[in-house]
Image (cartoon, rainbow, N blue to C red):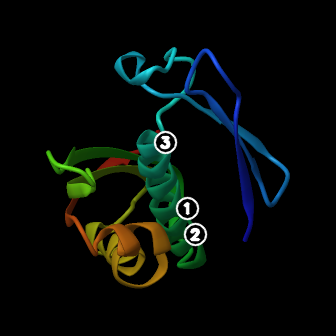
Amino acid sequence: MKCNVKWLGEGGMAFVAETGSGHLVSMDGAPDAGGRNLAPRPMEMLLAGTGGCTAFDVVMILKKGRHAVSGCEVRLEARRAEQDPKVFTHLHFHFRVSGKNLKPEAVARAIDLSKDKYCSASIMLGKTAQITHDFEIVEAG
């Protein structure tokens, strides 16, 4: 996996990343750090990527188990250390999974498999952060 990140130059703290798969992603710093608030912060991107990684796993696991999943949303809340390096110290994942006749045991199992085996991002962040999970199931109409 490769990525190239380029500072956009004087007058700000904006960066553009070109991923190995050829996609562009913008990032910017907070105004109090010289940014112009034009794009997500790099740590926000890390949190978003972690949410995408685990949501992908949960949907894939439920689909492979032939469960009628029709939606998956994960709300992440993070706390960071007060001193540099300001790593994540606590992460909470709240999953909202929708579908027809989804069993709580199946959803819990999918989340556990992502947490313990498949989601590289959350497993990596678990080295510095305490991670908790909960979920709700919404019956699809």
* Sooner in the amino-acid sequence: mark 3 or mark 2: 3
Report if residue 76 is visible in the image.
Answer: yes
Residue 33 % position (x, y): 39, 24
Q: For numbered disc 2, what is the local secondary structure? A: helix
- The residue tagged 1 is 56
- The residue tagged 3 is 42
Q: Is residue 134 left or right of residue 23?
A: left
Q: Give how far apart the Cα atoms at labels 2 and 1 are.
A: 6 Å
* Sooner in the amino-acid sequence: mark 1 or mark 3: 3
- Name the quadrant containing residue 11: top right
Which numbered disc covers residue 60?
Answer: 2
- Name the quadrant containing residue 135: bottom left
Amino acid type, label 3: Pro
- Name the quadrant containing residue 129: bottom left
Name the residue nearer the viewer: 122 or 29: 29
Residue 114 % position (x, y): 42, 74
Q: For numbered disc 3, what is the local secondary structure? A: helix
Residue 60 % position (x, y): 57, 69
Residue drawn at (26%, 50%), measured in percent from left and top? 86
- Marks 2, 1: nearer the viewer: 1
- Marks 1, 3: nearer the viewer: 3
Q: Residues within 10 Å of mark 1 (few under 14, many from 20)?
A: some
